Amino acid sequence: MSRVSVRRLTSAVQRSSRTFLAKPSVANRVFLTRTFTTHQSHTNSHGRSRNGKALAGLALGSAIVYATCLKDKAEASNAVNYDAVRKAIADKLDNINYDDGSYGPVLVRLAWHAAGTYDKVSRTGGSNGGTIRFHPESSHGANAGLKVARDLLEPIKKQFPGISYADLYTLAGVVAIEELGGPKIPWRAGRSDAVDGKSCPPDGRLPDASKAQDHVRQIFGRMGFNDQEIVALLGAHSLGRCHADRSGFEGPWTNAPTTFSNEYYRVLIEEKWVPRPPQKGKPFQFEDAKTKTLMMLPADIAFIQDPEFKKYVEIYAKDGERFRKDFAAAFSKLLELGCKFPEKSWWSKIFG
Ligand code: HIF
């Protein structure tokens, strides 16, 4: 290449570098300073030609890297403001006229029911797709009452149309847990929405509350959870209550159903649980012998009948911090079952 054409190419690259590098990152600034310094220190004709090519290549490479970072950043800034979505969800939670004063528990149930249909063998179900909003999944018996939660979130979907329903439903559960005093749950965006109910999972993937440990193990095993994780998840029943017009069961598990804590394990172990006297048309459940104001599902009682499960119930009843940590990991895993998240490009990881 002639000296003239090298000079032309070099100045073209410098021009293009100026365009891309209007705000060079620290890494790029160091890189470019070094490149230009090296170039200026060699003045003989052969060296100039070699250095000109090197300069051209390096500057062009730098410009490409920087342009890609800018593109990533532009995409990120066009995307949804998830902090604002979190705030919008948090603002919706309190309502003294609803249940125990918070929509938080029903949002947690929505998030878990959206995700808990996952089957690790067929890799179907799970929160991706947001299919819980479509018939037939929305009408599955286990999902009775969740319209309340979906309707509550609809104005937020309108306010932030860029968020998928699948992300919104799972994020709502996370925000509810955090707002009700629970741990920070690792959560990331990236779920996409199905356009209709064709990919709804079949009915029967969520647990049947009238059944015992074998059933619970089989249901959560199908999702990929071990005993410890299943028991860690179970602490979410410190929140909320059962409704006669939804599941048929009635009452809260704890005396503080809007506070996330390890109280569920404590009462499960410390209280005496007796069968509630049969009531016409109502499913069998347990009540606490002392006050008869708290309830346990047959599936909850299975956790103190099974020695392996009980071992972890005792650990979490004593160690609230361990419960918070293990719960956060297990709930995050639940919400990500079957989801694929876009990887950040390697240059964005390096150059930010
Ligand atoms: Fe629940 N769960 N859940 N659950 N659940 C109910 C309510 C909530 C089971 C059954 C029921 C989990 C596991 C299981 C919440 C969160 C989680 C109800 C009452 C039933 C019947 C619904 C109603 O009538 O309104 C069974 C059998 C489970 C396996 C053992 C998870 C671990 C605990 C995965 C979980 O996170 C929450 C929160 C509620 C309260 C909803 C409300 O509206 O207050």
Image: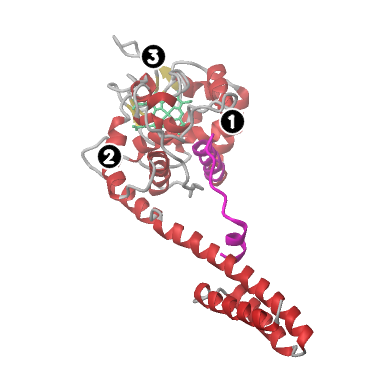
Q: Is residue 248 magenta?
A: no
Dividing the picture into quadrants, the one containing residue 199 is top left
Give the amino acid type for the residue marked by disc 3 in the picture: Phe
Give the labeled residue for mark 3: 284
Mark 3 and mark 2: span between their CA atoms? Answer: 31 Å
Disc 1 packing (10 Å; few <14; some 14–19; many ≥20): some
Foreground: disc 2 or disc 1: 2
SS type, badge 1: loop
* Overall secondary structure of the magenta section: helix
In this picture, is 41 found above or below 219? below
Give the labeled residue for mark 2: 152
Label 1 CB, ligand 1: below 8 Å?
Answer: no
CB under 8 Å between discs 1 and 3: no
* Residue 165 in sight: yes
Give the labeled residue for mark 1: 225
Residue 38 position within the rendered picture, expressed as x and y whole percent measured from the top left: 72, 84
Give the amino acid type for the residue marked by disc 2 in the picture: Leu
Dividing the picture into quadrants, the one containing residue 197 is top left
Mark 2 and mark 1: span between their CA atoms? Answer: 30 Å
SS type, badge 2: helix
Which region is colored magenta?
Answer: 324-352
User: Which residue in the rendered view is the most extreme toward the left?
Assistant: 97
Instruction: Judge left or right: residue 120 versus residue 150.
Output: right
Residue 223 position within the rendered picture, expressed as x and y whole percent measured from the top left: 56, 28
Residue at screen point 59% across, 37% down: 315
**Front-most of 123 and 145?**
123
Foreground: disc 1 or disc 3: 1
Quadrant containing the N terminus in the rendered view? bottom right
Disc 2 packing (10 Å; few <14; some 14–19; many ≥20): some
